[in-house]
Image (cartoon, rainbow, N blue to C red):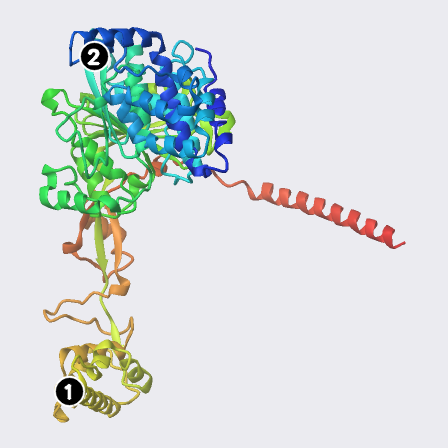
């Protein structure tokens, strides 16, 4: 159908003119979105409305109680309405518009009524009625033609998403709360089906399941169904989803209802803390979870599952930083994969760049990457152009994850650099200035399917992304001197200051503090007796002298005080002797400690002897601190060096610019002189 969805969305949004003054801008969507859904439902049911009411009378006359299946068949939809009202008849009784509209909504079957409940539509009816706006709003929407013979389900989906995008902008939603452009979803679905298209998806009468744990308004579910039907009109895709935002949930459920899907498969709530599809497994999964959104609200539930269930739960591999839950979604989805014995699963998820590399070795993010890669689940990553999304211009990546890799892909990961695959939009939509054409989608899908090295495609072994983080230590070398300047530093040491403090109260505290001050002065006096220009370059030698002074004074040198004195009276000195621990081993200097990331395929000792030892002969590896990490430095693998221009060319350009500047200055000088004369 050749219908401009933006023009219709603009007309629908013009209802906001009626709301101005009585509603804040951020609340416009609370009226516009549910009324759009309600009008669409009304238009869909209009052809069968009278037949449903007539059939209902017949059923009641026969005292039949379970009428839903019969009325659904009569309505030729998965829902129906038994109220005598519709939009045109509501306008016939202006004085009772609120009561009649409420009666109309109550006449819907359960799933349709549930949609309006999640919009909190009763509150808006009351608010509009009190502001004497309800009739005008109903009248405005009654003039909008949303009949399915004019606007098909796909176009209606675009309208819903355009309206909710505007609602999000009015509400100042964060950049992470974005909506996925249809062409991006289409690419994700193609990548998802790419390995299965010939072998499986074209079979007659196949039934497959698809799930989105952050389904929003249902765009991914709808596009996946459309693509599968284009491949195989006889295929059936049962879609499932869960959504946290009430308005988005209501629109998604309405969309599924209108498309003949079972709306009860769309669940409301947080997928992490209230997984309503807990025991389900799916053939395919898609998601575009919010970028960089913290998961603090569900932290307790997630941590409890991680700590108590481990790999028996969803988050056994690790927990990312609290301010970005992206990798929690991926783990959640992996937990819903079918066993390989049952056919396995494939999923595609959109991330920003953070999950590729954030977190060092043994961090939550790194451990999650490690678990995914070492279990051979990561099939491919596609880098997308920037400025593809409505509310954020950042770079994004599609991860394709599966537990049933084809034989040629086992143990390998494909990186596809598609950042240049875009065309400029004639008119930008928010931050969305670029888009993927059908040709771009086909080319990226072809590159993925060919699984070959090329300009835009690199193939790696799983272990190529792993590394060992070794801790390189160097010995601690200190000199010691008892000088007034260094003695003053002792007064700032915690152990020394704590001598003159007390946790007691009253006189007891006062006495303890006085005793502590006396002890401080005794220590200072002993050190002052050692003042000299002598520089000790061996710690053991200096400690021996220190202990002799305390012993001669009849004082005990407690370990905390000794440590404080050594810290205050020392300075790092490359010419000093190495400080040894109690076992005679060199003591490491924390300030000289360094780290090296050694590729997982390489022996750390060979690397150390080659890359470190020649430059730092006294260094060593602390074997106990070696950690395994995984990261995917995507950009590095596609970096193309651009050589600098020849110096002669640069000099010539500088001279040209200087000449231009001189000409301008000369012209300016002449102009000033003329004005003076």
Residue matched to label 2: 199
Number of numbered discs overlaid on the protein picture: 2
The N terminus lies in quadrant = top left
Q: Is residue 316 visible?
A: yes
Where's residue 514, x and y in %? Answer: 20, 90
Badge 1 vs badge 2, beta-carbon distance below 8 Å: no
Decide if residue 392 is on the left or right side of residue 77. Answer: right
Decide: is 187 above or below 59: below
Decide: is 198 above or below 673: above
Residue name at image x 19 percent, y 39 percent = 273
- Label 2, residues with CA under 10 Å away: few <14, some 14-19, many ≥20: few
Could you say whether the residue bearing mark 1 is in a helix, strand or loop?
helix
Q: Nearer the viewer, residue 643 or 364?
A: 364
Residue matched to label 1: 508
Residue 526: which quarter of the image?
Answer: bottom left
Residue 236: which quarter of the image?
Answer: top left
Residue name at image x 32 percent, y 7 percent = 50
Where's residue 395, x and y in %? Answer: 39, 35
Q: Nearer the viewer, residue 217 or 403?
A: 217
Q: Earlier in the sequence, mark 1 or mark 2?
A: 2
Q: Nearer the viewer, residue 14 or 305?
A: 14
The C terminus lies in quadrant = bottom right
- Label 1, residues with CA under 10 Å away: few <14, some 14-19, many ≥20: few
Where's residue 587, x and y in %? Answer: 18, 67
């Amino acid at each position: 159908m050749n219908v401009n969805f933006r023009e219709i969305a603009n007309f629908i949004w013009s209802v906001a003119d009626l709301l101005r003054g009585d509603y804040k801008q951020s609340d416009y969507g609370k009226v516009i979105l549910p009324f759009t859904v309600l009008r669409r439902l009304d238009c869909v049911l209009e052809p069968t409305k009278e037949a449903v009411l007539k059939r209902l009378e017949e059923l009641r006359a026969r005292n039949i109680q379970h009428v839903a299946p019969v009325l659904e068949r009569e309505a030729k939809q998965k829902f129906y309405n038994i109220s005598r009202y519709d939009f045109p008849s509501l306008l016939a009784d202006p004085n009772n518009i609120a009561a009649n509209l409420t009666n109309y909504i109550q006449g819907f079957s359960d799933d349709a009524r549930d949609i309006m409940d999640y919009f909190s539509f009763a509150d808006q009816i009351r608010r509009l009625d009190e502001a004497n706006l309800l009739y005008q709003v109903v009248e405005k929407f009654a003039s909008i033609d949303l009949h399915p013979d004019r606007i098909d389900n796909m176009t209606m989906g675009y309208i819903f998403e355009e309206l909710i995008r505007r609602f999000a902008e009015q509400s100042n939603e964060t950049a992470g709360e974005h909506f996925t452009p249809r062409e991006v979803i289409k690419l994700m679905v193609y990548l998802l089906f790419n390995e299965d298209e010939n072998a499986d998806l074209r079979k007659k009468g196949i039934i497959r399941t698809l799930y989105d744990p952050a389904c929003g308004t249902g765009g991914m579910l709808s596009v996946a169904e459309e693509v599968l039907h284009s491949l195989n009109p006889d295929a059936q895709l049962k879609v499932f989803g869960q959504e946290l935002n009430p308005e988005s949930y209501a629109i998604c459920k309405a969309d599924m209802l209108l498309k003949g899907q079972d709306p009860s498969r769309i669940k409301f709530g947080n997928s992490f803390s209230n997984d309503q599809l807990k025991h389900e497994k799916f053939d395919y999964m898609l998601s575009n979870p919010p970028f960089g959104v913290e998961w603090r609200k569900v932290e307790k539930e997630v941590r409890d599952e991680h700590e108590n269930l481990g790999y028996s739960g969803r988050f056994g591999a690790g927990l990312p930083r609290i301010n970005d839950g992206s990798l929690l979604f991926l783990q959640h989805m992996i937990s819903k994969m079918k066993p390989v014995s049952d056919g396995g699963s494939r999923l595609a998820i959109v991330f920003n760049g953070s999950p590729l590399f954030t977190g060092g070795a043994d961090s939550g993010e790194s451990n999650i990457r490690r678990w995914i890669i070492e279990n051979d689940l990561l099939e491919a990553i596609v880098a997308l152009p920037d400025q593809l999304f409505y509310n954020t211009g950042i770079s994004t990546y599609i991860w394709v994850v599966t537990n049933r890799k084809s034989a040629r892909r086992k143990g390998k990961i494909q990186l596809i650099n598609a950042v240049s695959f875009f065309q400029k939009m004639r008119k930008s939509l928010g931050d969305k200035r670029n888009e993927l054409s059908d040709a771009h989608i086909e080319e990226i899908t072809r590159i993925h399917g060919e699984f070959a090295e090329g300009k835009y495609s690199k193939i790696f072994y799983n272990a190529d992304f792993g590394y060992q983080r070794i801790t390189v230590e160097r010995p601690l070398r200190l000199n010691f001197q008892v000088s007034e300047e260094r003695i003053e530093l002792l007064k700032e040491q915690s152990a020394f200051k704590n001598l003159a403090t007390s946790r007691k109260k009253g006189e007891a505290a006062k006495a303890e503090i006085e005793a502590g001050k006396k002890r401080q002065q005794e220590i200072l006096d002993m050190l002052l007796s050692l003042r000299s220009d002598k520089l000790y370059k061996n710690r053991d030698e200096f400690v021996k002298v220190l202990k002799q002074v305390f012993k001669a004074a009849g004082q005990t040198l407690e370990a905390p005080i000794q440590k404080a004195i050594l810290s205050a009276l020392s300075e790092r000195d490359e010419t000093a002797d190495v400080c040894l621990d109690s076992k005679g081993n060199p003591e490491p200097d924390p300030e000289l400690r360094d780290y090296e990331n050694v590729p997982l395929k390489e022996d750390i000792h060979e690397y150390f002897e080659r890359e470190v030892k020649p430059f730092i002969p006294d260094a060593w590896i602390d074997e106990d601190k070696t950690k395994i990490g995984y990261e995917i430095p995507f950009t590095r693998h596609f970096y193309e060096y651009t050589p600098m221009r020849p110096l002669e060319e640069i000099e010539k350009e500088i001279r040209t610019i200087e000449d231009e500047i001189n000409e301008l200055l000369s012209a300016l000088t002449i102009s000033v002189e003329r004005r003076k004369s």
